[in-house]
Image: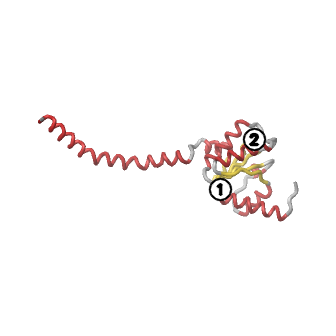
Amino acid sequence: MAFSKQHKVIMQEQYANWLKKSQAMIMVEYSGLDMKGINAIRNKAREAGGEFHVVKNTLLTNVFKDQSITIDETLLTGSTAVGFAFNDAPAMAKAMTDFVKGNEVFKVKGGYLGNQLMNASQIKALADLPPLPVMRAKLLGVIQAPASQLVRTLAEPARGLASVIRAHSEKSE
């Protein structure tokens, strides 16, 4: 389908906007995927806090050049769609890799984490990370552990003294 020059400019502006807002981009090949399948992956992308769009390779290449992002030409060949991760990059990567398992026509090509180029195996590794809330909880636990130990250490002499006084009072009764 041919687009007018004005429409192409609008599409490039939209691509640039998505690129600025996203933490990561996962590029996939979707040849042979019907509209029902595309809508299914769009729903998974929304659940992961992002968006999934079919893109025009030449226009996305122009946006990358404008943003001074290193371009891997192999990512922008054939039919390309991009999952833009706005909130949680591992969740988007997991949504894309999970969808690959059920579809032989859907293939992860690679992507970008920030401006860092990633191949398909790195995207898979990103997908294997725990979700953001789990990571935050683990980090909070690690941060709180020394403070909790300090409080227990400081409280221990008082507890020991209280135990001795209670034992002494029970003995004298």
Residue 144 percent location from the top left of the image = 41, 49
Mark 1 near mark 2, Cβ–Cβ under 8 Å?
A: no
In the displayed structure image, the side of residue 128 where residue 13 appears, left or right? right
56, above or below 100, in the image:
below
Q: Which of marks 1 and 2 is nearer the N terminus?
A: 1
Q: Which of 84 and 123 is in front in this view?
A: 84
Tell me the residue that label 2 is attached to: 106
Q: Residue furthest front?
A: 173
What's the residue at 31%, 45% (across, down)? 152
Which amino acid lies under the numbered mark 1 shown in the image of this protein? Ser
Please indicate, yes or no, whether residue 112 appears anywhere in the rendered image.
no
Q: Nearer the viewer, residue 148 or 35?
A: 35
As helix, strand or loop, the secondary structure at mark 1 comes to: loop
In the displayed structure image, the side of residue 25 where residue 155 appears, left or right? left
Please indicate, yes or no, whether residue 49 appears anywhere in the rendered image.
yes
> How many residues crowd around disc 1 within 10 Å: few (fewer than 14), some, or many (20 or more)?
many
What's the residue at 77%, 44% (across, down)? 30
Residue 73 percent location from the top left of the image = 76, 52
Tell me the residue that label 1 is attached to: 22
What's the residue at 51%, 49% (across, down)? 136
Q: Where does the C terminus fall, quadrant-wise?
A: top left
Residue 121 percent location from the top left of the image = 66, 42
Which amino acid lies under the numbered mark 2 shown in the image of this protein? Phe
What's the residue at 71%, 39% (across, down)? 100
Q: Residue furthest right?
A: 2
In the displayed structure image, the side of residue 86 where residue 149 appears, left or right? left
The residues tagged by marks 1 and 2 sit, at their Cα atoms, a distance apart of 22 Å
Q: Where does the N terminus fall, quadrant-wise?
A: bottom right
As helix, strand or loop, the secondary structure at mark 2 comes to: loop
> How many residues crowd around disc 2 within 10 Å: few (fewer than 14), some, or many (20 or more)?
many
Residue 61's tag is none
33, above or below 5, in the image:
above
